[in-house]
Amino acid sequence: MDEPRDITTDDAATLLRWFKERGGIAIWASLDGEMSWIAPYKTASRRPAARPNGQSERKPERIITDPAEVILRDPNGHNITLAQWAAQQ
């Protein structure tokens, strides 16, 4: 990911499910630029998902379709990719 985000291994199962079932994740910036959201890239019917709420930009800031591009922080503070985490499960 381009910018560090607070994504921990506690979030890994949900993110991995979104990669498998929803084609990846979308990063949505807020209209005021002060926050962002991570959401599934597609709906259950495999169409691009709508923005998560009215405070987010109309288009995602980034779409990630490869779990190797997502960096997680494990409970010990070490970084691991979502793909590496999935391989260990």
Image (cartoon, rainbow, N blue to C red):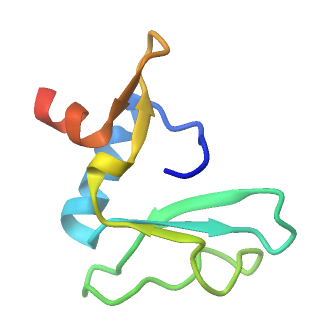
Is residue 53 depicted above or below 82 in this figure? Answer: below
Q: Residue at x 14, y 26 (%)?
A: 88
Q: Is residue 39 left or right of residue 44?
A: right
Q: For the C terminus, which image quadrant?
A: top left
Q: Measured from the top left, where is residue 11 in percent x and y?
A: 41, 39
Residue at figure coordinates x 61%, y 47% from the top left:
3
Q: Which residue is at a point 52% across and 69% down the rendered structure image?
A: 62
Q: Is residue 73 left or right of residue 68?
A: right
Residue 36 drawn at (x, y percent): 68, 59
**Front in this rendered view, residue 54 or 83:** 83
Horizontal side of 28 relative to 88 (left or right) equals right
Residue furthest toward the front?
2
Q: Give the residue drawn at x 49%, y 50%.
A: 1
Find residue 17 and report its image quarter.
bottom left
Above or below 77: residue 47: below
Q: Is residue 52 visible?
A: yes
The picture places residue 47, in percent across and down from the top left corner, at: 33, 90
**In the picture, residue 78 is in which quadrant?**
top left
Vertical comparison of 52 with 13: above or below:
below
Can the viewer see residue 89? no
Q: Residue furthest top?
A: 76
Relative placement, left or right, of 87 versus 61 is left
Indicate whether 37 appears above or below 67.
below
Point out residue 23 in the picture as x, y percentages from the top left corner: 26, 71
Report the number of discs.
0
